[in-house]
Image: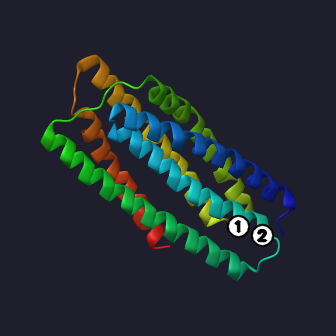
Amino acid sequence: MVTPKPYFQGIMVEIFSLAWMVLEFLIGCWSGIQAHSLLLIAFGLDSLLEIISGGALLWRLLVSTRLSAGAIAKVERQASRIVGWCLMALAVYIIVTSGYNLLTHQGAERSLLGTLMALASLICMPILMVIKLRIAEQIDSAALKEDAMCNLTCAYTAGAVLVGNLLTIWQGWWWSDSIFSLLLVILIVKEGLEGIRA
């Protein structure tokens, strides 16, 4: 039988993760709109998806001691499917917007705030992923493992934002924002399909 301590740790890490994702969502979307950066907007929207996923997992952890194993498994499957469909919608948004930006030669402007948020996320997300994977192993939660993989996706997105912004600033490559966004679609669709098939 699993002791309450791993559940408490899971709840604490999800609360921290949710607070961080709200900050990422607000800063990513706001700075992305200001800079006309698809990468930053995608970064913010990815955080919104992680808020949905984290909220479902937080609920799962809070009620896990009162639900049967079958009920917990059902909640985990539903949460995975919701996140999967949200990721697919994000992929469609990126494809359409990137295509439009490339056809019309629209590039992103500089965003110091967005770049700093992406740098902080690039540091924080792998740490959160490792903590979540450890707790998921202790409580045998596939959904928490998937949520940890969402943190990895967020780290990749943050890395793409940094590279895209630096290329735009240093080289003036107006197209880098859209190209890096399209490269993210591969990872987003892969994660989305895994969630839908859960």
Residue at 44% x, 23% y: name it. Answer: 112
Query: Which residue is tagged 1?
Result: 60
Question: How far from the left and from the top, in percent, is residue 6?
Answer: 79, 56
* Residue type for callout 2: Val
Query: Which residue is tagged 2?
Result: 63
Q: CA distance from mark 1 to mark 2?
A: 5 Å
Residue at 53% x, 41% y: name it. Answer: 26
Question: How far from the left and from the top, in percent, is residue 33?
Answer: 38, 38
Residue at 24% x, 19% y: name it. Answer: 171
Residue at 35% x, 27% y: name it. Answer: 165
Q: Secondary structure at mark 2?
A: helix
* 86 shown above or below 17: below
* The disc label shown at residue 87, or none: none
Q: Secondary structure at mark 1?
A: helix
Please state the total of marks drawn on the protein image. 2
Q: Quadrant of residue 194?
A: bottom left
Contact, mark 1 vs mark 2 (Cβ under 8 Å): yes
Residue found farthest to the left: 103
* Residue type for callout 1: Arg
